[in-house]
Amino acid sequence: MKKEPIFTRGFIFCFIATFFNSMIFYMLISISAEYARAFGAGGSLQGLASGIYVLGMLLTRFLFSRILAVIGWKKMICIFQPLHIASCFFYFLICDMPTFLIVRLVHGLFFGLASSSILTAGTYHLAKSRYGEANGYMMTGITLAIAVGPFAAGLIYDTFGPNGCFVSAVAIAAGMWICLLLSRTDYDSFLAKDKEENKALIKEKPHGLNSMIEVSALPITVCTFISAFSYSTILSFIRTYGQVLDLAGTVSLFFVVYAAVLLVSRPAAGRIQDRKGDSVIIYPCIIMQFFSLFLLWVSPNPFGIIFSAVLCAAGYGSATSCFNTITTRGLSAERKAYAVNTYWIGCDLANGLGPVVLGAVMEASGVRNMYLIAAVTSVFTLVFYRFLYQRFAAKRAVMTA
């Protein structure tokens, strides 16, 4: 039997748009703490500079599904993508720490709507018979951005200053919108076809919490939140750690190694998930995430940092892709938008609270000890997965029976 193709036109352009979308996020969040420090901000304010952006994203994630239901896909893309591009220009108005925080919040609001539309559009182009594998490939767009974003941001920041990063953000946001248009996704036809094929999955008009999120995805979203909360210490403070250790050169390679490993591990994890089930891949991934963070505490040297990047990619990087697959698999196209939104709410909340809470920990006990606390926190992902996933799986089985 011929395999269902993965790399269609729509998939490729949504993949590129996803890459651009993540580039903006990882570029700006990786320099925000350093930029805030230039205004004399301490650890907590540096964390807030990262977290307030994600707070803006979080607010619009909750509104995304309702806005989509009212105005539809075409208006969503034609209105909010240009508004996101416009919000990138606000960075040129920054003159002090308060205005920086305001601009980060406003940009986060519009980025959240633009990002949700792109990430949901991507799920419409995943091959149904190879869903985990296809999602693994789609998520490699984020993988590449995780490496290229912080690396490019550091290079541009050191060469051209913060304004160079802001110009880059405007250009990338424009490219993101163009790619989404070039994907030529006929959302109305797609949804109509999906309704016909999946009549059993179509429920009555959602109300209450289900009108904003996918309630059945909450257990996995909790696991995603804990895992991402721990990882946020790497995302926001690894450059600071490199400066403290006088290993800035080694730390700059962290995300390059991370991406190189993840380009291999993420699709492989998707194939294993499709064939062997979720738990076979999730348990070892979370264990590897723990050791990646533990290494940053116990072995603050070049070898420890690079090996931590390898474990972090194979662990956290692969786990997030698998969690994303679980939240959307088996749902109708209409509910996939809500499930994607729910998943990213967990990520956004973690990336918003993590830098603030753990930034305060860093200020109190030092950046090295912060990574020990993050490692211990990551263990709770296993605990919640073990107990919540069983209920989630049972409920989803009843829903799709």
Image (cartoon, rainbow, N blue to C red):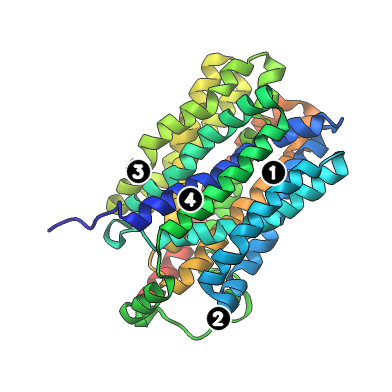
Near mark 2 (Cα within 10 A), the count class, few <14, some 14-19 or many ≥20, is: few
Q: Quadrant of the N terminus?
A: bottom left
Viewer-proximal residue among 241 and 122: 122
Disc 1 marks a residue whose amino acid type is Gly
State the SS at label 2.
loop
Which residue is found at the position 70% from the left and 57% from the top? 109
The residue labelled by disc 1 is: 354
The residue labelled by disc 2 is: 206
Give how far apart the Cα atoms at labels 4 and 3 are: 19 Å
**Residue 95: x percent and y percent?**
86, 39
Which residue is found at the position 41% from the left and 73% from the top? 332
The residue labelled by disc 4 is: 17
Q: Residue furthest bottom?
A: 204
| Residue 308 visible in rendering | yes
Near mark 3 (Cα within 10 A), the count class, few <14, some 14-19 or many ≥20, is: many
In the displayed structure image, the side of residue 65 where residue 194 appears, left or right: left
Splitting the image into 4 quarters, where does residue 25 fall? top right
